[in-house]
Image (cartoon, rainbow, N blue to C red):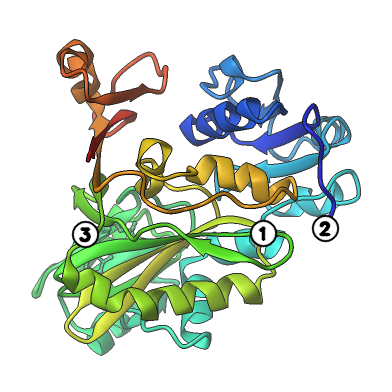
Amino acid sequence: MKTLPPGSTIGILGGGQLGRMLSVAASQLGYRCHIYAPDTNSVAAEISAEFTCAEDDDIASLTRFAESCDVITFEFENVPVDPLHQIQDCAPLHPPIAALDIAQNRVAEKVFARNHGGTTAPFAEVTDRAALDRAIAEIGAPAILKTIRMGYDGKGQSRIHPGDDLDEHWEAVAHQPCVAEGFITFDHEFSVILVRGQDGEIRFWDTPHNVHEDGILSVSTAPAPAEILQQQDDARALAAKMAEAMDYVGVLTCEFFATNEGPVFNEMAPRVHNSGHWTIEGAVTSQFENHIRAICGLPLGDTGLAAKKVEMHNLIGAQADEWQNLLSDGTNHLHLYGKGESRPGRKMGHVTKTYF
Ligand code: AMP
């Protein structure tokens, strides 16, 4: 295990709020961050030591960036994988490229979870309009059609009800390759958030109970209710097996539905995750700090709860305009990501409440 001393440079691919919070954690430990992102407006770059603004497939810029870094990570799972193979010799990359390969493809992700003993929704790959008919005949409705690549926060998805005109759903996903998933009846949603060090040590945070609205995370609460905790061991075992199989280093998040038949794996994020933002104030060591510790080869920090109960509320779109009201409660921990314009559905910040 190679330990990177403070003062070293951490490269972060992606320039959004996750990169911003990683950069805050890294700077607390004395590291410098170099952000690589295609947009000039990067909320991560504005608080980091260096910024390369270039396209993800600009090999010359990517190589210069990689040569300036001691380790490279990412805050966005849709970073194109092929260019990363070309910079592998410049600096270590954590988590591994294999994790990106799997997480970028909803079919590969489900197959990977099943191969490690997990349960997923019934699914079928849909590559053309005729395949959609076959998939719905096989799976039944209700179902959800999701683009295999690039979907997030409910984007690139279409919910199919019994008797629907499937042409409309095929239009809704712009004829892109999809996965059709059976609709899961679940009691709750939760995520397993773990960190794996370079020596293979795995630590889990308390399991958050996640409530989504319109496909976007709204609230995460820890500890979770008993119905989720009963399923925690099985879900953790699957997440740990998947992490080990990828020789993963860093924070890995797996999202689950809690059903009567046990945990159903939905998807994985090979990165710090919105459902773990509560760990900044609600855990002894945050997901951001432990990700930095893992990729830099430092000992992992304690993942235990730092309060009796913690609640994280996302501020979506205009909800962030309430910042003054939110600050009038002195117990609120307000995080604003510095994004200028509050568009509907855009994650602008979050508020964490800790109860002792
Ligand atoms: P995803 O983009 O896969 O995370 O989906 C966003 C949200 O849609 C999830 O958090 C669930 O609330 C809901 N959802 C996704 N897939 C299913 C499914 N197969 N059955 C029921 N609800 C789902």
Mark 1, mark 3: which one is toward the viewer? 1
Q: Which residue is mark 3?
A: 168
| Vertical arrangement, residue 11 with respect to residue 334, above or below | below
Local SS, label 3: helix
On the image, the x and y values in percent for residue 50 come to 72, 19
Say which of 92 and 205 sits in front: 205
On the image, the x and y values in percent for residue 269 come to 49, 57
Which residue: 42% across, 57% down? 205
Local SS, label 2: loop
Instruction: Give the numbered dot on residue 197.
Output: 1
Say which of 6 and 106 sits in front: 6
Label 1 within 8 A of ligand 1 by Cβ: no
Which residue: 36% across, 50% down? 305
- The reply to whether callout 2 and callout 1 are in contact (CB within 8 Å) is yes
Would residue 272 appear left or right of 234 to someone viewing this image?
A: right
Could you tell me how many numbered marks the image carries? 3
Q: CA distance from mark 3 to mark 2?
A: 53 Å
- Quick one: label 1 or label 3, which is nearer the N terminus? 3
Which residue: 25% across, 80% down? 136
Would residue 45 appear left or right of 344 to someone viewing this image?
A: right
Q: Is residue 230 visible?
A: yes
Local SS, label 1: loop
Residue type at numbered disc 2: Met
Residue type at numbered disc 3: Glu
Say which of 190 and 353 sits in front: 353
Q: Quadrant of residue 175?
A: bottom left
